[in-house]
Image: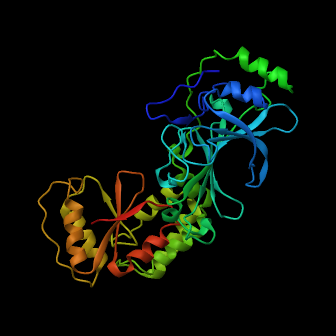
Amino acid sequence: MGLFSRAPKGDLNLNYDAIAGYAVGWLPYSENAIQLAFPHLTVSLATILDYNRGTTDGFALFDADQTEPVLCIAKDGDSGYAFSVSAHNRQALILGKYRIDETVLGDFRDDHMDSADFWVDGSKIVVMGGMREHGAAYTARHMFLPPADWTGDLRKAGADVWRTCVLSETRFFVSGQRIRPTDDIDTAGGVKLVKKHRGQARQPLQPGPNRGGGDPIKLLLQGLYSSKEAQKAYLKLADIIVYNAGIAATKARIKTVFENHEAPDDVALRLSEMYNEERETVFMVPLDWTAEPSDLANRITCALGDEAVPLPVVENRSVAEDGVFAVYAKSLQDAGFDLWSLDTQSDTHCLFVARKKDRKRIAKLLIPTQAAACVFA
């Protein structure tokens, strides 16, 4: 057990290799053992929040603020070990930089993240991390609640709402059966174990699962992705955006793409490649990153069809140079159109033209496709 030492701002840090200074993966459940493990905090018996947001008997640990506990410890049945250590207010620092009731999901990153999902009724978001087989001493559950004025199922809300959900609890699970020194332990044995490991140094934290690059939003989107819903969205998009091809033929090609591809990036790339022998624009405008600005102007003009929009002459050698897309986007917006970009995770630019009045509608339709898209400003 590494003894607690305060950070410059006096923060109580909870991490996967140490919880407020306690660096051993198991924790005996008795007042004396817990007081030895956390000598910098005051330990008291209390009624605390349990795993499912009800209440249970446990220990509350107080720092300078005696009105609310900085940590709460729940027991694991009659084993003599603790089940979890949790934080419910901003006194504790989570993963070195986050705070309860302050950090929003859009700012939260966890290199040891294993999963992100919705509570069974869609009322909150649960982020899990720190799988032991990847080297972390503890596993953790981070709970995020929507803003007070939000009502409804978060699964139907979209990423913009998810990003505003606020961290409401972090719970670190301790004393897993595979890492306990013994299956069960009594009060005296627990105190003896803590004393024995008092000088144990914390082990360097090994890389964790890091799913989704540590970004919970990515995992939430992946979990909700449905190729059926994505296809429906693209078919509706075909009724809205501007292109010089038959709508029925375009929709038929979209369905063909989905017969052979399902992953969001694969679908977006294949849709960007759809065109007929005359290279008339069909749905999207594919453009290699080395293309000249005149190629982009020609493709936009082709997509617009009978909608005549004067486009500038740009002397740059490649569309990849800074500001090229913005120049054309400005001319289109002056005429009431937007120039959109769809990320295909490739060297090919995937563009499409739409009316400015449809911007919000298109952005909503793109959510189930999980294709990253933006409007050139």
- The reply to whether residue 175 is visible in this rendering is yes
Task: Find the residue positioned furthest to the bottom.
Answer: 306
Q: Residue at x 51, y 29 (%)?
A: 6
Q: Position of residue 287 (x, y in %)?
A: 31, 60
Number of residue marks: 0
Q: Residue at x 17, y 77 (%)?
A: 310
Residue 172 appears left or right of 80: left
Q: Quarter of the image holding residue 122?
A: bottom right
Q: Quarter of the image holding residue 282?
A: bottom left
Q: Is 217 placed above or below 307 here?
A: above
- The reply to whether residue 25 is visible in this rendering is no
Q: Position of residue 323 (x, y in %)?
A: 20, 58
Question: In what quadrant of the picture does the C terminus appear?
Answer: bottom left
Residue 50 appears left or right of 94: right
Observer-nearest residue: 81 or 117? 81
Q: Position of residue 195 (x, y in %)?
A: 72, 17
Question: In what quadrant of the picture does the N terminus appear?
Answer: top right
Q: Is 300 placed above or below 133 here?
A: below
Observer-nearest residue: 320 or 188? 188
Q: Is 359 placed above or below 60 here?
A: below
**Way the structure is coloured:** rainbow
Q: Residue at x 76, y 19 (%)?
A: 193
Q: Residue at x 46, y 51 (%)?
A: 107
Residue 101 appears left or right of 329: right
Q: Position of residue 149 (x, y in %)?
A: 55, 71
Residue 165 appears left or right of 75: left
